[in-house]
Image: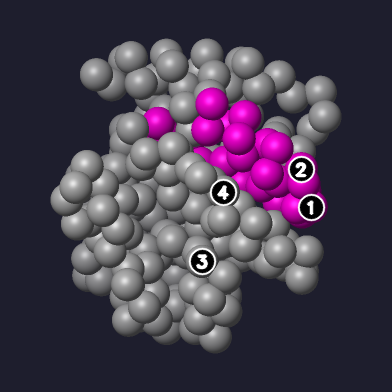
Amino acid sequence: SGSRSMNGTPITLQAALGSALSAAPIMAILRGLGRERTLRTAHVLWEAGVRCVEVPLQSAEDEASLVALRSQPAPDGAITGAGTILSASQVERAAELGAQFIVSPGYATDVVTRCRELEIAPLPGVGAASDVQAAVAAGLGWVKGFPAVALGRSWFAAMHAPFPDVRFVATGGIDISNASTWLDTPGIGAVSLGSALADPSFDLRRLAELTRSVRTQSQ
């Protein structure tokens, strides 16, 4: 079933995704880290307060990482998804592996529809007003703005005017040093951190500080 119990109340995974991103507006993308490093990094992220983790599925090893991560006891409100999903058949595979939400680089009606049928949360990529309008028509409150740095903060602010109820997860080119600036942009509800997390020199303590400061500001 797509429903999970949070605080004793049944909740759809669509609502769970929104709650996770609202609680800590950082989505961690664990791309190609391998099973052990994926688990290790996810636990540190959870400790830092991150509640939304994406594992892009581009190899059998990535699939094994997602399965292993879903088998771990996660904190309350944490949600784990699959990324780089391009087709309805890939949605089905990700669902079999335990994905609770689906991230795509663009907006594809068949992907969103299959997510709905399987009761998992779609997070499609958008880069134009027509994409955002399609997402609104599909009843989605959260979308992925991609590629964020190429689009620019002004694009998100411009989209916020006609689509004030849509929350964007700004994705692509954002790191710890500029995450707070992006989160201050109208319309942006969360940011994704990907390649920064794969860098061995990345200081996860800074992520914990950022997560804490953002959560404090939003309370």
Labelled disc at residue 72: 4
Labelled disc at residue 34: 1
Residue 137 percent coordinates (x, y): 22, 70
Label 2 to label 4: alpha-carbon separation: 14 Å
Q: Quadrant of the C terminus?
A: top left
For badge 2, the amino acid type reads Arg
For badge 1, the amino acid type reads Gly
Residue depicted at x 30% and y 58%: 4
Residue 179 percent coordinates (x, y): 53, 26
Q: Earlier in the sequence, mark 3 or mark 2?
A: 2
Magenta range: 24-47
Label 1 to label 4: alpha-carbon separation: 15 Å
Labelled disc at residue 37: 2
Q: Earlier in the sequence, mark 1 or mark 3?
A: 1
Determine whether label 2 and label 1 are within 8 Å by CB. Answer: yes
Q: Residues within 10 Å of mark 4 (few under 14, many from 20)?
A: few
Q: Earlier in the sequence, mark 1 or mark 4?
A: 1
Left or right position of 137 against 59: left
Residue 154 percent coordinates (x, y): 42, 36
For badge 3, the amino acid type reads Gly
Labelled disc at residue 98: 3
For the residue labelled by badge 4, is the local secondary structure a helix, a strand or a loop? loop
Closer to us: 6 or 33: 6
Q: Earlier in the sequence, mark 4 or mark 3?
A: 4
Q: Is residue 153 visible?
A: no
